[in-house]
Amino acid sequence: MTDKPIELYIWPTPNAWKVSIALEEMELPYVVKYVHIGKGEQFTPEFLKISPNNRMPAIIDPEGPDGAPISVFESGAILQYLARKSGKFYGNNERERVAVEEWLMWQMGGLGPMSGQASHFRNYAPALVDDPKLIEYGRNRYFNETNRLFGVMNKRLAEVPYLAGDYSIADMACFPWVRAFEFIGQDLDDFPVLKAWVDKLSAREAVARGMEVGREMRVDQTKLSDEQKKEQAKALFNQSAKDLK
Ligand SMILES: N[C@@H](CCC(=O)N[C@@H](CS)C(=O)NCC(=O)O)C(=O)O
Protein backbone atom coordinates (compact mmCIF):
# COMPACT_ATOMS: atom_id res chain seq x y z
CA MET A 1 0.00 0.00 0.00
CA THR A 2 0.98 3.59 -0.62
CA ASP A 3 3.46 5.35 1.65
CA LYS A 4 3.78 8.58 -0.29
CA PRO A 5 0.52 10.56 -0.28
CA ILE A 6 -1.52 10.89 -3.44
CA GLU A 7 -1.69 14.50 -4.63
CA LEU A 8 -5.33 15.57 -5.04
CA TYR A 9 -5.81 18.60 -7.30
CA ILE A 10 -9.18 20.17 -6.59
CA TRP A 11 -11.40 23.10 -5.97
CA PRO A 12 -14.29 22.42 -3.57
CA THR A 13 -17.20 21.29 -5.80
CA PRO A 14 -19.19 18.03 -6.06
CA ASN A 15 -16.84 16.60 -8.70
CA ALA A 16 -13.93 17.05 -6.29
CA TRP A 17 -15.74 15.55 -3.30
CA LYS A 18 -16.35 12.32 -5.18
CA VAL A 19 -12.60 11.73 -5.01
CA SER A 20 -11.99 13.01 -1.47
CA ILE A 21 -14.78 10.70 -0.27
CA ALA A 22 -13.18 7.76 -2.10
CA LEU A 23 -9.73 8.51 -0.66
CA GLU A 24 -11.22 8.66 2.84
CA GLU A 25 -13.25 5.46 2.36
CA MET A 26 -10.22 3.61 0.97
CA GLU A 27 -7.93 4.97 3.69
CA LEU A 28 -5.38 6.13 1.14
CA PRO A 29 -3.12 8.96 2.34
CA TYR A 30 -3.46 12.14 0.30
CA VAL A 31 -2.52 15.77 0.23
CA VAL A 32 -4.78 18.48 -1.19
CA LYS A 33 -3.47 20.92 -3.81
CA TYR A 34 -5.90 23.70 -4.68
CA VAL A 35 -6.59 24.74 -8.25
CA HIS A 36 -8.52 28.01 -8.05
CA ILE A 37 -10.81 27.58 -11.04
CA GLY A 38 -12.45 30.99 -10.48
CA LYS A 39 -9.03 32.57 -11.05
CA GLY A 40 -8.13 30.47 -14.10
CA GLU A 41 -5.50 28.24 -12.44
CA GLN A 42 -6.88 25.26 -14.42
CA PHE A 43 -5.21 26.77 -17.50
CA THR A 44 -1.63 26.78 -16.20
CA PRO A 45 0.73 24.62 -18.30
CA GLU A 46 1.64 22.57 -15.19
CA PHE A 47 -2.01 21.68 -14.54
CA LEU A 48 -2.82 21.03 -18.21
CA LYS A 49 -0.02 18.45 -18.20
CA ILE A 50 -2.00 16.31 -15.76
CA SER A 51 -5.49 17.42 -16.84
CA PRO A 52 -5.55 18.37 -20.54
CA ASN A 53 -9.31 19.13 -20.32
CA ASN A 54 -8.61 22.09 -17.95
CA ARG A 55 -10.98 20.64 -15.40
CA MET A 56 -10.40 19.41 -11.88
CA PRO A 57 -10.28 16.92 -10.15
CA ALA A 58 -7.01 15.27 -11.06
CA ILE A 59 -4.55 13.21 -9.05
CA ILE A 60 -0.89 12.32 -9.11
CA ASP A 61 -0.05 9.04 -7.46
CA PRO A 62 3.72 9.10 -6.79
CA GLU A 63 3.59 5.30 -6.57
CA GLY A 64 1.77 4.26 -9.73
CA PRO A 65 1.20 0.69 -10.96
CA ASP A 66 4.86 0.19 -11.91
CA GLY A 67 6.20 2.10 -8.92
CA ALA A 68 6.62 5.27 -11.01
CA PRO A 69 4.30 8.31 -10.70
CA ILE A 70 1.04 8.36 -12.63
CA SER A 71 -1.47 11.17 -13.13
CA VAL A 72 -5.18 10.62 -13.72
CA PHE A 73 -7.87 13.12 -14.78
CA GLU A 74 -11.69 12.70 -15.02
CA SER A 75 -13.33 11.87 -11.72
CA GLY A 76 -14.75 8.55 -13.00
CA ALA A 77 -11.34 7.34 -14.16
CA ILE A 78 -9.83 8.46 -10.84
CA LEU A 79 -12.44 6.52 -8.86
CA GLN A 80 -11.81 3.39 -10.94
CA TYR A 81 -8.04 3.77 -10.51
CA LEU A 82 -8.28 4.22 -6.74
CA ALA A 83 -10.72 1.32 -6.41
CA ARG A 84 -8.38 -0.97 -8.36
CA LYS A 85 -5.38 0.24 -6.34
CA SER A 86 -7.08 -0.32 -2.99
CA GLY A 87 -9.09 -3.37 -4.05
CA LYS A 88 -12.20 -1.80 -2.49
CA PHE A 89 -15.70 -0.67 -3.54
CA TYR A 90 -15.58 -2.05 -7.11
CA GLY A 91 -17.38 -5.40 -6.79
CA ASN A 92 -15.91 -8.86 -6.29
CA ASN A 93 -16.67 -10.45 -9.64
CA GLU A 94 -17.43 -9.47 -13.24
CA ARG A 95 -21.21 -9.25 -12.68
CA GLU A 96 -20.74 -6.89 -9.72
CA ARG A 97 -18.14 -4.82 -11.58
CA VAL A 98 -20.53 -4.37 -14.52
CA ALA A 99 -23.18 -3.03 -12.13
CA VAL A 100 -20.68 -0.59 -10.58
CA GLU A 101 -19.59 0.60 -14.02
CA GLU A 102 -23.18 1.03 -15.23
CA TRP A 103 -24.01 3.37 -12.38
CA LEU A 104 -20.64 5.12 -12.45
CA MET A 105 -21.01 5.87 -16.19
CA TRP A 106 -24.61 6.89 -15.56
CA GLN A 107 -23.32 9.48 -13.13
CA MET A 108 -20.50 10.64 -15.40
CA GLY A 109 -22.65 10.93 -18.52
CA GLY A 110 -25.94 11.94 -16.91
CA LEU A 111 -26.32 13.05 -13.33
CA GLY A 112 -23.06 15.06 -13.20
CA PRO A 113 -23.34 17.03 -16.47
CA MET A 114 -27.11 17.56 -16.20
CA SER A 115 -26.91 18.75 -12.58
CA GLY A 116 -23.97 20.98 -13.56
CA GLN A 117 -26.01 22.62 -16.31
CA ALA A 118 -29.08 22.88 -14.06
CA SER A 119 -26.91 24.68 -11.52
CA HIS A 120 -25.45 26.97 -14.18
CA PHE A 121 -28.86 28.06 -15.46
CA ARG A 122 -30.21 28.50 -11.94
CA ASN A 123 -27.27 30.10 -10.12
CA TYR A 124 -25.04 31.82 -12.67
CA ALA A 125 -26.83 32.45 -15.99
CA PRO A 126 -29.39 34.92 -14.57
CA ALA A 127 -26.59 37.41 -13.86
CA LEU A 128 -25.11 36.91 -17.34
CA VAL A 129 -28.13 37.81 -19.49
CA ASP A 130 -30.23 40.96 -19.75
CA ASP A 131 -33.49 39.19 -20.56
CA PRO A 132 -34.47 36.19 -18.35
CA LYS A 133 -36.48 34.80 -21.29
CA LEU A 134 -33.18 33.96 -23.01
CA ILE A 135 -32.39 31.30 -20.42
CA GLU A 136 -35.88 29.99 -19.71
CA TYR A 137 -35.71 27.04 -22.12
CA GLY A 138 -32.29 25.86 -20.92
CA ARG A 139 -33.23 26.32 -17.29
CA ASN A 140 -36.36 24.18 -17.65
CA ARG A 141 -34.66 21.56 -19.78
CA TYR A 142 -31.84 20.87 -17.31
CA PHE A 143 -34.10 21.16 -14.28
CA ASN A 144 -36.46 18.53 -15.77
CA GLU A 145 -33.70 16.18 -16.83
CA THR A 146 -32.06 16.35 -13.39
CA ASN A 147 -35.48 15.77 -11.85
CA ARG A 148 -35.90 12.67 -14.04
CA LEU A 149 -32.46 11.39 -13.00
CA PHE A 150 -33.31 11.88 -9.31
CA GLY A 151 -36.44 9.81 -10.06
CA VAL A 152 -34.32 7.04 -11.61
CA MET A 153 -32.21 6.83 -8.44
CA ASN A 154 -35.27 6.91 -6.22
CA LYS A 155 -36.75 3.94 -8.11
CA ARG A 156 -33.49 1.99 -8.19
CA LEU A 157 -32.85 2.46 -4.47
CA ALA A 158 -36.29 1.06 -3.68
CA GLU A 159 -34.98 -2.25 -5.08
CA VAL A 160 -31.38 -2.33 -3.79
CA PRO A 161 -29.63 -0.71 -0.79
CA TYR A 162 -26.96 0.99 -2.93
CA LEU A 163 -26.90 1.95 -6.60
CA ALA A 164 -24.85 -1.03 -7.75
CA GLY A 165 -26.21 -3.39 -5.07
CA ASP A 166 -23.36 -3.08 -2.58
CA TYR A 167 -21.81 0.23 -1.50
CA SER A 168 -19.38 1.27 -4.23
CA ILE A 169 -17.60 4.07 -6.09
CA ALA A 170 -20.89 4.61 -7.97
CA ASP A 171 -22.53 5.85 -4.74
CA MET A 172 -19.48 8.02 -4.02
CA ALA A 173 -19.80 9.56 -7.50
CA CYS A 174 -23.50 10.35 -7.14
CA PHE A 175 -23.63 11.44 -3.51
CA PRO A 176 -22.09 14.96 -3.71
CA TRP A 177 -24.41 15.91 -6.59
CA VAL A 178 -27.53 14.65 -4.83
CA ARG A 179 -26.37 16.32 -1.61
CA ALA A 180 -26.31 19.60 -3.58
CA PHE A 181 -30.04 19.19 -4.31
CA GLU A 182 -30.98 22.66 -3.06
CA PHE A 183 -28.30 24.38 -5.11
CA ILE A 184 -29.51 22.61 -8.25
CA GLY A 185 -33.16 23.34 -7.44
CA GLN A 186 -34.49 19.89 -6.52
CA ASP A 187 -36.67 19.00 -3.54
CA LEU A 188 -35.55 15.79 -1.80
CA ASP A 189 -38.96 15.45 -0.16
CA ASP A 190 -40.21 14.39 -3.60
CA PHE A 191 -37.75 11.47 -3.50
CA PRO A 192 -38.11 9.77 -0.11
CA VAL A 193 -36.05 6.68 -0.91
CA LEU A 194 -33.23 8.80 -2.30
CA LYS A 195 -33.44 10.99 0.79
CA ALA A 196 -32.98 7.93 3.03
CA TRP A 197 -29.89 6.96 0.96
CA VAL A 198 -28.50 10.49 1.42
CA ASP A 199 -29.02 10.17 5.18
CA LYS A 200 -27.36 6.73 5.20
CA LEU A 201 -24.29 7.97 3.33
CA SER A 202 -24.11 11.21 5.33
CA ALA A 203 -23.81 9.10 8.48
CA ARG A 204 -20.62 7.46 7.20
CA GLU A 205 -17.60 9.12 8.83
CA ALA A 206 -15.44 8.82 5.71
CA VAL A 207 -18.14 10.51 3.62
CA ALA A 208 -18.45 13.34 6.15
CA ARG A 209 -14.66 13.81 6.15
CA GLY A 210 -14.54 13.75 2.35
CA MET A 211 -17.26 16.40 2.10
CA GLU A 212 -15.30 18.65 4.48
CA VAL A 213 -12.31 18.83 2.16
CA GLY A 214 -11.79 22.36 0.91
CA ARG A 215 -14.37 23.89 3.22
CA GLU A 216 -12.03 26.79 4.02
CA MET A 217 -11.77 27.62 0.30
CA ARG A 218 -15.51 27.58 -0.47
CA VAL A 219 -16.73 30.77 -2.05
CA ASP A 220 -20.02 32.23 -0.85
CA GLN A 221 -21.36 33.48 -4.17
CA THR A 222 -23.65 35.97 -2.42
CA LYS A 223 -20.63 37.73 -0.89
CA LEU A 224 -18.75 38.32 -4.15
CA SER A 225 -18.40 41.87 -5.47
CA ASP A 226 -19.47 42.57 -9.07
CA GLU A 227 -15.78 42.78 -9.99
CA GLN A 228 -15.09 39.35 -8.44
CA LYS A 229 -18.13 37.87 -10.20
CA LYS A 230 -16.88 39.21 -13.51
CA GLU A 231 -13.41 37.74 -12.93
CA GLN A 232 -14.95 34.37 -12.05
CA ALA A 233 -17.29 34.41 -15.06
CA LYS A 234 -14.37 35.26 -17.35
CA ALA A 235 -12.41 32.22 -16.12
CA LEU A 236 -15.32 29.79 -16.06
CA PHE A 237 -17.91 30.68 -18.68
CA ASN A 238 -17.86 31.21 -22.45
CA GLN A 239 -14.79 29.01 -22.84
CA SER A 240 -13.90 27.84 -26.33
CA ALA A 241 -10.87 26.32 -28.05
CA LYS A 242 -9.25 29.75 -28.11
CA ASP A 243 -8.70 29.45 -24.33
CA LEU A 244 -6.36 26.49 -24.75
CA LYS A 245 -2.91 27.91 -25.15
N1 LIG B 1 -16.12 15.22 -16.31
C1 LIG B 1 -15.25 15.96 -15.41
C2 LIG B 1 -15.93 17.24 -15.03
C3 LIG B 1 -15.08 18.07 -14.12
C4 LIG B 1 -15.56 19.52 -14.05
O1 LIG B 1 -16.51 19.90 -14.73
N2 LIG B 1 -14.89 20.31 -13.20
C5 LIG B 1 -15.21 21.70 -13.13
C6 LIG B 1 -15.66 22.11 -11.75
S1 LIG B 1 -17.02 21.17 -11.17
C7 LIG B 1 -13.97 22.51 -13.48
O2 LIG B 1 -12.86 22.11 -13.21
N3 LIG B 1 -14.18 23.65 -14.10
C8 LIG B 1 -13.13 24.51 -14.53
C9 LIG B 1 -13.49 25.20 -15.80
O3 LIG B 1 -14.68 25.19 -16.17
O4 LIG B 1 -12.60 25.76 -16.42
C10 LIG B 1 -14.97 15.11 -14.17
O5 LIG B 1 -15.91 14.47 -13.71
O6 LIG B 1 -13.83 15.08 -13.72
Image: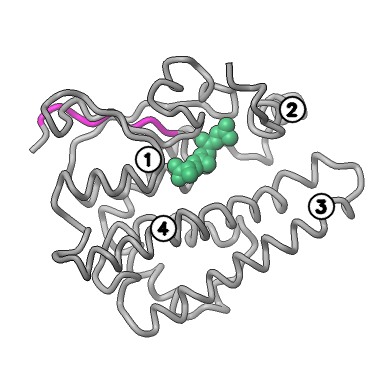
**Of labels 2 and 4, the one closer to you:** 4
N-terminal of the two: label 3 or label 4?
Answer: 4
Q: Residues within 10 Å of mark 4 (few under 14, many from 20)?
A: some
The magenta-colored residue range is 3-10
Tell me residue 190's x, y (percent).
57, 79
Contact? badges 2 and 4 (CB < 8 Å):
no
Give the residue number, with chain letter if any, for mark 1: 213
Q: Which of marks 1 and 2 is nearer the N terminus?
A: 1
Q: In this view, does 81 lie to the left or right of 235?
A: left
- Horizontal arrangement in the rendering, residue 154 relative to residue 235 (left or right): left
**Residue at the disc numbered 4:** 105
The residue under label 2 is 230
Of labels 1 and 3, the one closer to you: 3
* Vertical relation: 139 (above or below) 217: below
Question: What residue is at 30 percent from the left and 68 percent from the top?
Answer: 99
Residue 68 image-quadrant placement: top left
Residue at image position (37%, 26%) is 33
How far across and how far down the image is residue 149, in percent? 54, 69
Q: Which amino acid does label 2 sit on?
A: Lys
In what quadrant of the picture does the N terminus appear? top left
Q: How far apart are marks 1 and 3 (CA)?
A: 33 Å
Indicate how the structure is coloured in the image: one colour
In terms of sequence position, does the residue under pointer 1 or pointer 3 come before the other? 3
Q: Is residue 157 above or below residue 223?
A: below
Within the magenta stretch, is there residue 31?
no
Q: Residue at x 30, y 29 (%)?
A: 71
**Mark 3 Cα within 10 Å, few/some/many (few <14, many 20+)?**
some
